[in-house]
Image (spheres, helix red, strand yellow):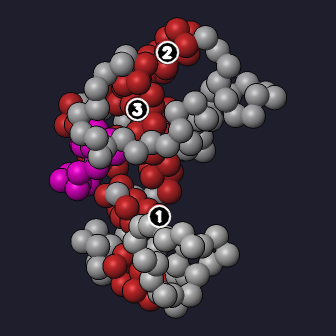
């Protein structure tokens, strides 16, 4: 008879894959999520927008859906530009932008959402798109651009909500998210 090695398994109910069952533990998992500092006091603490300051502003109704989408688009564009430049991230926690290659506006038809251009061509196009959007944002003033960068990209709490709303409105217009509205300013 062979002797088993390793740690003894706990005697708990298990899933078919061998992992301990999580049935009945949902309440304690949600209690941990509910007590996270950025989710405390929110009616819908499970909403994905509660994870960052921009989303929490949208949940509170302080910015509209178009401004929220413009902030997300700016975050993704900045992440793509930094990747194109091979720039190090200023903070490993910042720029949770998701998959870089599968972003709207870059995919060709029939490619399954992936950008099939050569890396140099893709990087050149990304830097051009960033420069155009950055110029539109900088035209609104340094404080507006700094507030948008701070909240949308770096994930800091908003300090000047009118400047943030103004910058996000201009970006929404530039990205074509707010086509029905005229450009602010």
Residue at which label 1 appears: 48
Q: Residue furthest right?
A: 110
Q: Residue at x 58, y 81 (%)?
A: 14
Give the x, y percent position of residue 66: 50, 51
Looking at the picture, does residue 6 appear above or below residue 151?
below
Q: Which residue is mark 2?
A: 123
Mark 3 sits on what residue? 79
- Where in the figure is residue 165, as x and y percent of width and height? 34, 49
User: Gap between marks 3 and 1, in whole Å?
Assistant: 20 Å
CA gap, disc 1 to disc 2? 30 Å
Q: At 64% from the left edge and 15% from the top edge, which residue is drawn?
A: 117
Q: Does dot 3 land on a helix, a strand or a loop? A: helix
User: As rendered, which of 161 and 111 lies closer to the eye?
Assistant: 111
Residue 23 appears anywhere in the view:
no
Relative placement, left or right, of 64 versus 23 is left
Which stretch appears magenta? 147-161
> SS of the residue at dot 2?
helix
Residue 129 pos. (x, y %):
48, 21
- Relative horizontal placement of residue 80, taking residue 158 as reference (left or right): right
Tell me which numbered mark, 1 or 2, is placed earlier along the sequence. 1
């Amino acid at each position: 008879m062979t002797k088993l090695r390793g740690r003894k398994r706990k005697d708990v109910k298990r899933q078919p894959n061998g992992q301990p069952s999580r049935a009945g533990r949902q309440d304690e998992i949600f209690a941990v999520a509910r007590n996270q500092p950025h989710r405390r006091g929110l009616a819908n603490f499970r909403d994905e927008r509660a994870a960052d300051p921009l989303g929490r502003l949208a949940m509170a109704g302080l910015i509209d859906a178009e401004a929220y989408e413009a902030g997300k688009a700016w975050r993704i564009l900045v992440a793509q530009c930094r990747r194109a430049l091979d720039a190090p991230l200023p903070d490993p926690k910042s720029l949770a932008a998701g998959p870089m290659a599968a972003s709207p506006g870059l995919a060709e038809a029939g490619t399954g959402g992936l950008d099939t251009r050569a890396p140099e061509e893709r990087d050149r196009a990304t830097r051009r798109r960033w420069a155009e959007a950055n110029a539109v944002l900088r035209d609104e003033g340094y404080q507006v651009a700094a507030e948008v960068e701070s909240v949308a990209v770096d994930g800091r709490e908003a300090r000047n909500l009118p400047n943030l709303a103004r910058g996000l409105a201009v970006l929404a217009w530039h990205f074509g998210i707010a086509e029905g509205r005229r450009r602010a300013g």
